[in-house]
Image (tube, rainbow, N blue to C red):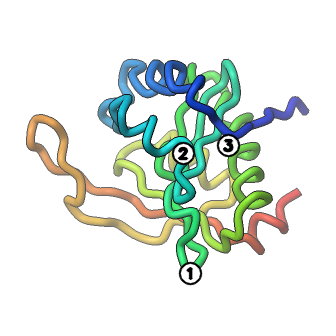
Amino acid sequence: MIRATARRATLDDIPFILATERLPGYEKTVGRFDEAEHVAQVDHPDWLYLVAEGLGLGIFQDIRHPDQNIQLRRFIVTEPSKGLGSLLLPAVLGHAFQHTDAHRIWLRLVDGNTAAVKLYAKCGFVREGIQRQAGVRPDGSRFDFIVMSVLRPEWEMQD
């Protein structure tokens, strides 16, 4: 099986991150930061930016959370529906568990994004619940978030 490798991002990766975030469709499911936010966060100790050239990226928040709960804030592939998520997500999670003291990695995703739910479940995430009408789109419409997480012991039990 081919394995991806994720590495910590640098300021030089900001153009790739911006371009990937702005691929069509992600504005409704993933969200975006502007360039100044990425510049401020890429080297900040509370954030972990990971990239895999040509594949995509993962952005974690709250790396120093006292309860060891870190959020996978963004997970984006360069070509959706091509299997890149199944290749990249294990590398991103593996890096986070190896290089942080995270006990729990959690995320929230737009309800109705069934492909993402399936991918996260395949990688060990468990659905925890719904945050009702917790998100607002640019047009003002509200939507629900699904909350999922994977615990370090669960991750370590995977092949």
- Give percent across and percent down for residue 16: 54, 20
Question: Quick one: label 1, few (<14), some, or many (20+) residues within 10 Å?
Answer: few
* Three-letter code, disc 3: Leu
In front: mark 1 or mark 3?
1
Q: Disc 2 marks which residue?
A: 59
Q: Nearer the viewer, residue 21 or 126?
A: 21
* Three-letter code, disc 2: Ile
* Real-space Cα separation, disc 1 to disc 2, in angstroms: 19 Å
Total labels: the figure holds 3
Q: Mark 1 or 3 closer to N-term?
A: 1
In this picture, is 58 found above or below 21?
below
**Tags 3 and 2 touching, CB below 8 Å:** no
Q: Kindly identify the residue that appears in the image at 36 percent across and 33 percent down.
A: 36
- Judged from this view, the residue extending furthest toward the bottom is 67
On residue 152, the disc is: none
* Real-space Cα separation, disc 3 to disc 2, in angstroms: 11 Å
Q: Kindly identify the residue that appears in the image at 50 percent across and 56 percent down.
A: 61
The quadrant of the rendering that contains the N terminus is top right
On residue 67, the disc is: 1
Q: Mark 3 or 2 closer to N-term?
A: 2
- Give percent across and percent down for residue 155: 76, 64
In this picture, is 136 found above or below 138?
below
Question: Quick one: label 3, few (<14), some, or many (20+) residues within 10 Å?
Answer: many
Q: Kindly identify the residue that appears in the image at 74 percent across and 46 percent down.
A: 90
- Judged from this view, the residue extending furthest toward the left is 140
Q: Secondary structure at mark 3?
A: helix
- Give percent across and percent down for residue 84: 67, 28
Q: Secondary structure at mark 1?
A: loop
The quadrant of the rendering that contains the C terminus is bottom right
Give the left or right position of residue 145, taking residue 68 as reference. left
Dividing the picture into quadrants, the one containing residue 113 is: top left
Q: Disc 3 marks which residue?
A: 89
